[in-house]
């Protein structure tokens, strides 16, 4: 009887160790899938959360960062975000994310309606083995920049896919970042965030930076026939004309 109790205790101990090991492995798998942005719910909720609410949060530090990684073909690449003229929309997507499917489909449309006509779209995936290079390359639309860079996911504080960050490269600032259930929701939120951002940095509608204001001023002057050498613009070029007092006639 004593031998049977000992054997039973040993068997229970071995089973407990097996169960503990299985639970630990299961937790590791869930964490790996979460980092890869692959939801486990059948309805394809964002980052493992079914029916995640639409949200657009403030960027972590408000600054933009360039992206260094590999192209879907496997070559090293760098995408300049800071200093770039205009806006860049970074779309953090995964080939295995069900929620991302609607965005892959939308980005393949030739008449994609971006928040601003001059916006550049860049799709960012994670490094292998968190992302399949072949699957990612097959989903990336022709003509759209795509890069695999887990470092970009970290620096832009991406919690999971799909996730979006709108960046103003002219001012090296982020307009906003967040997630949504589909492209229509995301585009509308980005437009609202962009409108608030433009009013913050430039009260004049349609402006995005001091550089843009200067360019518009030059265009307006040229339309009026006033070039950079005009006396009202260039004091050196017009110095002789302004040396004559306005209330006296010029010498003959």
Image: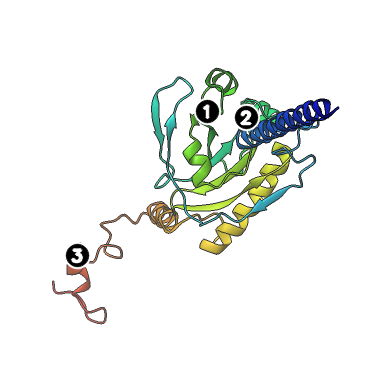
Callout 1: SS: loop
Callout 2: SS: helix
| Residue at left offset 70%, top offset 50% | 55
User: Where is mark 2, residue-wise?
Assistant: 107
> Residue farthest to the right?
1
Q: Nearer the viewer, residue 103 or 76?
A: 76
Q: Earlier in the sequence, mark 1 or mark 3?
A: 1
User: Where is mark 1, residue-wise?
Assistant: 144
Quarter in which the N terminus is drawn: top right
Q: CA distance from mark 2 to mark 3?
A: 52 Å
Quarter in which the C terminus is drawn: bottom left
Please state if 81 lies on the left or on the right of 26 as rendered.
Answer: left
Give the answer, above or below, for where 216 lies relative to 236: above
Q: Residue 120: x, y in percent?
A: 51, 38
> Residue farthest to the left?
252
Give the answer, above or below, for where 202 lies relative to 97: below
Q: Are marks 1 and 3 in contact (CB under 8 Å)?
A: no
Regarding residue 159, the answer to whether it shows in the image is: yes
User: Where is mark 3, residue-wise?
Assistant: 236
| Residue at left offset 52%, top offset 52% | 174
Residue 182, image quadrant: top right
Q: CA distance from mark 1 to mark 3?
A: 48 Å
Mark 2 residue crowding within 10 angstroms, few (<14) / some (14–19) / many (20+):
many
Q: Residue 145: x, y in percent?
A: 49, 30
Q: Earlier in the sequence, mark 2 or mark 3?
A: 2
């Amino acid at each position: 009887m004593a031998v049977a109790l000992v054997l039973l205790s040993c068997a229970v101990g071995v089973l407990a160790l097996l169960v503990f090991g299985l639970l630990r492995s299961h937790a590791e798998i869930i964490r790996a899938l979460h980092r890869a942005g692959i939801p486990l719910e059948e309805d394809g909720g964002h980052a493992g959360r079914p029916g995640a609410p639409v949200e657009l949060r403030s960027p972590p530090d408000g600054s933009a960062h360039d992206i260094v990684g590999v192209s879907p073909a496997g070559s090293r690449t760098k995408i300049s975000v800071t200093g770039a003229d205009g806006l860049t929309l970074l779309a953090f997507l995964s080939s295995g994310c069900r929620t991302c499917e609607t965005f892959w489909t939308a980005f393949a449309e030739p008449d994609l309606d971006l928040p601003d006509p001059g916006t550049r779209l860049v799709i960012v995936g994670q490094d292998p083995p968190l992302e399949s290079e072949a699957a990612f390359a097959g989903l990336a639309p022709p003509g759209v920049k795509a890069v695999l860079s887990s470092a970009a996911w970290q620096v832009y504080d991406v919690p999971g896919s799909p996730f979006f960050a709108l960046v103003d490269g002219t001012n090296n600032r982020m307009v906003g970042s967040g997630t949504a259930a589909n492209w229509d929701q995301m585009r509308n939120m980005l437009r609202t965030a962009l409108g608030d951002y433009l009013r913050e940095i430039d009260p004049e509608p349609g402006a995005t930076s001091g550089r843009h204001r200067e360019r518009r001023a030059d265009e307006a002057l040229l339309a009026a026939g006033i070039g950079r050498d005009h006396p009202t613009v260039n004091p050196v070029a017009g110095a002789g004309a302004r040396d004559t007092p306005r209330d006296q006639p010029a010498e003959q």
